[in-house]
Amino acid sequence: MTLTAESGRTSAIGFYAASYYVGGSVGAVLPGLTWSVGGWPACVAMVLVMQAAMATVILLAWKR
């Protein structure tokens, strides 16, 4: 089954593009800052925190 937007398509495209570029920017800067603060242990901790955050989002937003 394919879902398509009935209305607000341009808003959805704008939200997607903004999220894509903001997320890419944060994903490029945050690891560097984490590395400069704490090296490998801080980077590993950052990855674990991000994975936990994404798991939480999935658990809260997933609809069967």
Image (tube, helix red, strand yellow):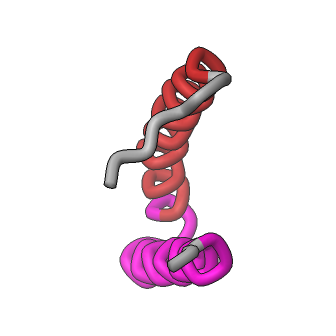
Of the pair 27 and 34, the residue shown nearer to us: 27
Residue shown at the point (57%, 75%) measured from the top left:
63
**How many dots with numbers?**
0
Left of 28 or right of it: where is 16? right
Of the pair 20 and 31, the residue shown nearer to us: 20
The answer to whether residue 59 is above or below residue 12 is below
Q: Quadrant of the N terminus?
A: bottom left
Where's residue 54, x and y in %?
53, 72
Helix, strand or loop for the magenta stretch, by majority: helix
Where's residue 19, x and y in %?
56, 36
Of the pair 35 and 54, the residue shown nearer to us: 54
Q: Is residue 49 visible?
A: no
The magenta segment? 35-61
Is residue 34 inside the magenta stretch? no
Where's residue 50, x and y in %?
52, 72
Of the pair 41 and 64, the residue shown nearer to us: 64
Residue shown at the point (51%, 79%) measured from the top left:
64
Left of 31 or right of it: where is 57? right
Is residue 42 inside the magenta stretch? yes
Task: Looking at this view, name the residue that lies furthest to the left.
Answer: 1
Task: Looking at this view, name the residue that lies furthest to the top.
Answer: 10
Residue shown at the point (54%, 44%) measured from the top left:
26
The answer to whether residue 48 is above or below residue 11 is below
Q: Is residue 29 visible?
A: yes
